[in-house]
Amino acid sequence: MAATLSVAGCLGYTIESEDDVQQRKARIDELESEVGDLESQVETKDSTIEDLEAEVEQKQSEIEDLEASIEEKDGEIDSLESDLETEQKELISKLYELGESHRQRAFKNWQDGGDLYDQGDYSGASNEWGLAAGQYIDATEVFAEAASIASDQGRSEVADMIESSKNRVQTSATAAHQFSLASYYYSHDNESQGDKHLQEGNSALEELDQYTLYDPSEIDSSLGL
């Protein structure tokens, strides 16, 4: 009877051991399955990371291209701004030259008017001084435009120089106009009116020294041309 119990006990142990082994195998299979799933997830994550890294690299390349494009555009803008500045300077210069051309023609008429006046040809003198006044007015208008452009561009020194020339030719226009009127009245034997306008013309001449007439080369030098 004791031997039978011993065998049964051994048999029971053996059965318990086999069940334990089966459970362990099942657990191992379960763990291996979980590991496989995790490895699959890791591979998926690795693939995603690689895709993201490739996307980042592409974006970085695009950013570099954009930065290069921006740098190129900045260069174009700098070039255009430089060209515009030069064109603005040249515009001021050419306007001043045009105003000076009007002034020179006015001065020629002025001299001719003076010569005719000295010769007693008051009618001719009146005509020449009238032409001079018109040319001086044209010069005044052109100088005013040039000064305005220079001022708008922040070139205060150039604007002040042109403004001085403008004031001088404007005063010359006033004097020429008064001398033209004086000569007209003298030609019609109205000495009182002639003397009146002659005095007004001389008064205008006295104001000329308040203003400096600049040569075009001085304007160009101040502009940096």
Image: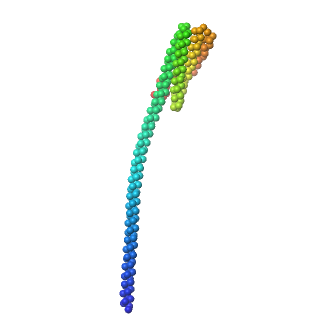
Q: Residue at x 48, y 22 (%)?
A: 98
**In front: 213, or 135?**
135
Is the N terminus in the top left, top right, bottom left or bottom right quadrant?
Answer: bottom left
**In front: 172, or 12?**
12
Quick check: can you spot residue 11? yes
Relative to 157, 66 lies left or right: left
Q: Residue furthest front?
A: 188
Rendered image quadrant of residue 166: top right
Image position, residue 6 (x, y; %): 37, 88
In the depicted structure, whether residue 129 falls above or below residue 88: above
Quick check: can you spot residue 212? no
Is the C terminus in the top left, top right, bottom left or bottom right quadrant?
Answer: top left
Image position, residue 170 (x, y; %): 56, 21
Q: Residue at x 41, y 50 (%)?
A: 59
**In front: 141, or 151?**
141
Relative to 160, 1 lies left or right: left
Q: Residue furthest right?
A: 192
Q: Residue furthest bottom?
A: 1
In the depicted structure, whether residue 169 falls above or below residue 153: above
Rendered image quadrant of residue 205: top right
In the depicted structure, whether residue 58 falls above or below residue 99: below
Image position, residue 146 (x, y; %): 51, 26
How many numbered tags mark residues here?
0
Q: Residue at x 54, y 8 (%)?
A: 121
Q: How is the image coloured?
A: rainbow
Q: Residue at x 44, y 32 (%)?
A: 83
Image position, residue 20 (x, y; %): 39, 77
